[in-house]
Structures are given as C-alpha cells and as structure tokens.
Image (spheres, helix red, strand yellow):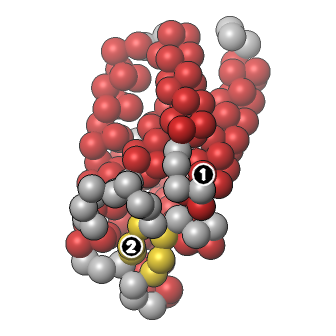
Amino acid sequence: MRNPFLNRTFSTAIFYIGWVICLQEVSKEHSYYGFLLVFCFLIYFLYYSACRKADALLLFLILLIGPFSDMIYAHFGLLKYHSMHQLHSLIPPLWVFILWALFGANVHLFSWLKHRWWLSTLLGAVGGPASYFSVIKLGGASLLKPLPFTMVTIGGVWAIFFPFL
C-alpha cells in the first residue's frame, strides 16, 4: 500500500482488531488467532517498510523493552497476568509479547509527536495506564496494589519511555 492515508488507516485498524482479538483470546486461554494476525501484519509491515532494517531494529527493541517493563511491574507486585501457559509468574504470557509486537509495528503512527516532547510525554502518561487499565478490565491481568498507585507508576514509566520512540 503506497497511499500514506490508507496505510495509516490499515495499520490503525489492524492494531485495534489485533488488540481486541488478543484480549478476547485471553479469556479462552489461547492466543492462536491473535498470534496469526499479528504475525501476518508484521510480515506486511516489514515487506512494505521504506526503512526495513531500522523498523526491524525498532521492533526488536520494543519487543525487549516492553515485556521487560512488564516483568518489572510483576516483580514489584503491581500486576499479575492471567494465563494457563505462563512459564513463570514474572515472565509475561505470549499474548503480552504479541501486543508489544503489534505496538512496535505501529509506533510509526505517532511520528507526528517527534518534536512535541511535552505532548508525547502527556500521551505516554495517559495512554500507557489506559492501555493497562483496559487489559485489567477485560480480564487479562489483576491489580496487586491500589489502582491509583499502579496507574501513576505505569504512567510515570510511559511518560519517560514514550517520547523516545
């Protein structure tokens, strides 16, 4: 897809569809359809990428940093993820990695924030916790600490992390 508007629209639609499918599958204790959808989207994303190496590197870094931050949240007792197939209580389940891959492939949608540090900080501070809150409400995770403390902590991490993407 060479039309930038169609490409952004398609990427946004796949992001939200993938998000919903992955979280619906958490309640069914599998993540096959979400994995398949995201895998196909990643192939599409890298195939049509103008900067394939840079996008692959960014995707790889997000796949390292994102789940690592989730491990830290679990280690400090903020969240507990729900999954029968989780290897260890500190290692996020497969569906979390799938969501991070989906986010990594769509981070280019936020390129308009590149020189707007204050706005990207604000978006990270609000959007990060909102994302985790939706996972909690949809049954993918449980809070182990009070909601305000957890959301402020996650918001602080995202406020710092998001502008550097």
Residue farthest bottom in this picture: 146
Q: Position of residue 13 (x, y in %)?
A: 72, 36
Q: In the rendered image, which residue does mark 2 sit on?
A: 80
Quarter of the image that includes the C terminus: top left
* Observer able to see residue 103: no
- Residue bearing mark 1: 25
Q: Quote the CA–CA distance across marks 2 and 1.
A: 17 Å
Earlier sequence position, callout 2 versus callout 1: 1
Q: Quadrant of residue 63?
A: top left
What SS does tag 1 mark? helix
Residue 151 position within the rendered picture, expressed as x and y whole percent measured from the top left: 47, 77
Q: Residue at x 50, y 86 (%)?
A: 147
Residue 160 or residue 47, whichever sits in front: 47
Say left or right for 96 vs 112. left
Q: Residue at x 27, y 56 (%)?
A: 87
The residue depicted at 47 percent of the width and 77 percent of the height is: 142
Q: Secondary structure at mark 2?
A: strand
Q: Is residue 66 above or below residue 111?
A: below
